[in-house]
Image (cartoon, rainbow, N blue to C red):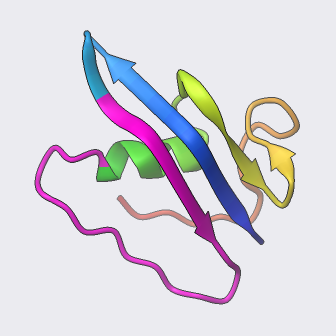
Amino acid sequence: MKISVKNISREMKSTIILDNINLEFESGKIYGLCGHNGSGKTMLLRAIAGLIQIDRGEIMIDEKILHKGIDYPPEMGLII
């Protein structure tokens, strides 16, 4: 599975939570997210898992756009 995050942004209550995020995750590798409390790590994971909608950009799972081609990533496990 390949996950591509392209220029995603999310705003809540006039506060920018995710601002133009670009990442790529490849199958078979382990990734970790580091950051201060409130930096958007959990919101990013929720967006990738399909639990929240993003305002701008796109999340692609194996070249299918999340919430357009698929509703959630198949075979994905997530611990928040």
| Residue 43 visible, this angle | yes
Between residue 21 and residue 69, name the one nearer to us: 21
| Residue 49 visible, this angle | no
Q: Quadrant of residue 36?
A: bottom left
Please give left or right for residue 33 compared with residue 47 in the image: left
Between residue 33 and residue 19, name the one nearer to us: 19
Q: Residue furthest left?
A: 37
How many labels sit on residues?
0
Q: Quadrant of residue 24?
A: bottom right
Q: Is residue 67 rendered magenta in the image?
A: no
Q: Is residue 25 rendered magenta in the image?
A: yes
x, y (%) of residue 63? 86, 54
Please give left or right for residue 77 compared with residue 70 in the image: left
Query: Measured along the vertical axis of the image, is residue 65 above or below residue 73?
Result: above
Query: Measured along the vertical axis of the image, is residue 57 above or below residue 5?
Result: above
Quadrant in which the C terminus appears: bottom left
x, y (%) of residue 47? 52, 41
Quadrant in which the N terminus appears: bottom right
Instruction: Give the prevailing secondary structure in the magenta stretch.
Output: loop
x, y (%) of residue 26? 68, 77
Please give left or right for residue 78 compared with residue 3 in the image: left
x, y (%) of residue 49? 58, 49
* Image point (51%, 85%), residue name: 30
- What residue range appears in magenta? 17-40
Between residue 75 and residue 40, name the one nearer to us: 40
Please give left or right for residue 29 compared with residue 35 in the image: right
* Image point (29%, 25%), residue name: 16
Between residue 78 and residue 24, name the one nearer to us: 24
Q: Quadrant of residue 35?
A: bottom left
Query: Measured along the vertical axis of the image, is residue 47 above or below residue 61?
Result: above
* Image point (33%, 68%), residue name: 33
